[in-house]
Amino acid sequence: MSIPVLEVVEVRKAFGSELVLEDISITVPEHTATVLIGASGSGKSTLLRCINLLELVDDGTIKLDGQEITSVATNSDDVRRKLGMVFQSFNLFPHMKVLDNIILAPMRVHKMSREEATEKALELLKRFGLSEKADQYPDRLSGGQQQRVAIIRSLAVEPRLLLLDEVTSALDPVLVNEVLSTVRDLKDHGMTMVLATHEMGFAKQVADEVCFLEKGRILEWGSPEKMLENPTNPRTKDFLQRVHEAGRL
Amino acid sequence: MSEEVRRGDGSSHSAPYSFGGEWTPTAIEMERRASRKRTVRKNALVAALSSIFVLGTISSIVVTSPGWKVLSATFFDWSYGFSILPKVLAGFFESNVILTLIASVSVAVIGLTLALIRTSRSPALTPFRILATIYVDMFRGIPMLLIILLVGFGVPALQLKGVTNNVFILGIIAVIITYSAYVAEVIRSGILTVHPSQRAAARSLGLSNFQTLRYVVLPQALRRVTPPLLNDLVALIKDTGLVSILGVTDAIRAAQIEASRTFNYTPYVMAACVFLLVTIPLTRFTDRTLRRSIERQNAQGQA
């Protein structure tokens, strides 16, 4: 059995007196997608931010390709070089054109030449149908396009692991699909991912494993079929029921 | 009538309706347009009449008042004014302009450095952070005239070897000391307004702290504070006049020398005009930059 890309072991995190993650353990093998579901405030985003070292864990360990990244000796810049992260609010750099957003990290972090970085970026833009947006500023793009650019930006550094934090939550329903099909495409190409999402249908399509979080704990986990159709934990059932009802409103 | 209505009306004249192909406005729309046109004409007429009435009344009161003759002879003796204008201009270009140029560049560099030190979180910079904070607090709180007096008269009194006694240079230094503190705070506020999520996005791409600052935070921060910085530039131009207290022959000092010779105050008015010639265009430019930056931010908000 090869080493999993990501291994989170008994991670704990508190903001002040509020415990937001408690004994969280997940394992993400290569080329698989783990989907985190749960209500807002259940700790999904915090977990992703901890993996990215944007937050420091209060206990437990996180390993990337078998190497502990939560050790004090870790250089967080080196770790983030291997990770891609996409945020709910896109967070494109508004003062840079789409192309410059994408080539910034390859050039500055990975010391790629401008020509090489541009060539790669244009290839990615073409692959996701955004070629004609390369010379536009982000605020000229629709929300869905902005989020796809944000995904491309994080792909441009060829990450080992992609973290997606509710990437469709800020989009209107019509635009959700274009982003989701982009993520599906990545999954089909073998990208290893951890996603937090409220889109259950989508979770079923891409997930190899689904984890249900509530109040900072993983209450139940398993295959998407089991988790989304036959959950055993009453809390999971209750959550899915509420999501389902919200979808019908 | 509000501006929007007039703007809406203007666009309906200039831009032909392209949607819907061949299209003639309905009678209702034609009547609306005609009505808007009438309103615009009426507004222009009212504005013109009220301006003529108010401004005319004020100027006729001023001109017919008993003191007007003395006043205009003392302050607005134009032929005298133009005869000494070259002296005022010489002072303006040789002192105020040069002072502004040198000071604004130095202030930009020092102010930016202070702002970066104050916003940094590196533990190694802690003593510098403390010093920068003290510096900014002090020099923002002391009137600039005092700093000019302290530097301009105080430093020569020390009789240090190798330190200049040139009041022009000391004056520039005093201006730079004070304005660096102002500008540092403006830039710092700009840095603080860049949303933390921008920093998070940059860091998660693997950019170092410095690269994040250099490529993501600072460009956005400086763009946002350009209008207030231009305001400070206007203030700086005016405040260079304060170094005249040290005996630097700038526009104000040149005017003062003339005025004290003839007891006619027209030279001061001439000096004021010279300053206005530079500051008014710059203020207009600042307004326009500010308006654009607000529009740009609004556009971003809507996206």
Image (cartoon, coloured by chain):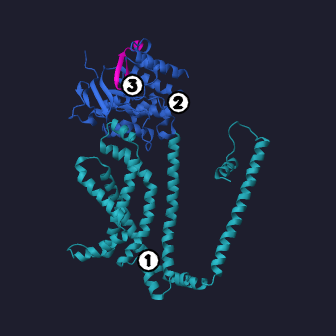
Q: State which chain disc 1 sits on.
A: B
What are the residue bounds of the magenta stretch? A210-226
Secondary structure at numbered mark 1: helix
Q: Main secondary structure of the magenta part?
A: strand
Look at the picture and state if B178 lies above or below A82. Answer: below
Look at the picture and state if B117 lies above or below B163. Answer: above
Mark 2: amino acid = Asp
Secondary structure at numbered mark 3: strand
Quarter of the image for the C terminus of chain A: give it.
top right
Residue A222 is covered by the magenta coloring:
yes
Where is residue A126 shown, x and y percent of the image? 46, 30
- Residue annotated with mark 3: A195
Give the numbered dot on residue B252: 1
Residue B42: image quadrant is bottom right
- Residue annotated with mark 2: A172
Q: State which chain disc 3 sits on.
A: A
Q: Marks 2 and 3, Cα distance to the nearest angstrom?
A: 19 Å
Q: Marks 3 and 1, Cα distance to the nearest angstrom?
A: 68 Å
Residue B71 is covered by the magenta coloring:
no
Residue ranking furthest to the bottom: B262
Where is residue B287 shown, x and y percent of the image? 52, 58
Give the numbered dot on residue B7: none
Mark 3: amino acid = Leu
Where is residue B62 shown, x and y percent of the image? 63, 78
Q: Are marks 2 and 1 on the same chain?
A: no
Q: Colour of chain A?
A: blue
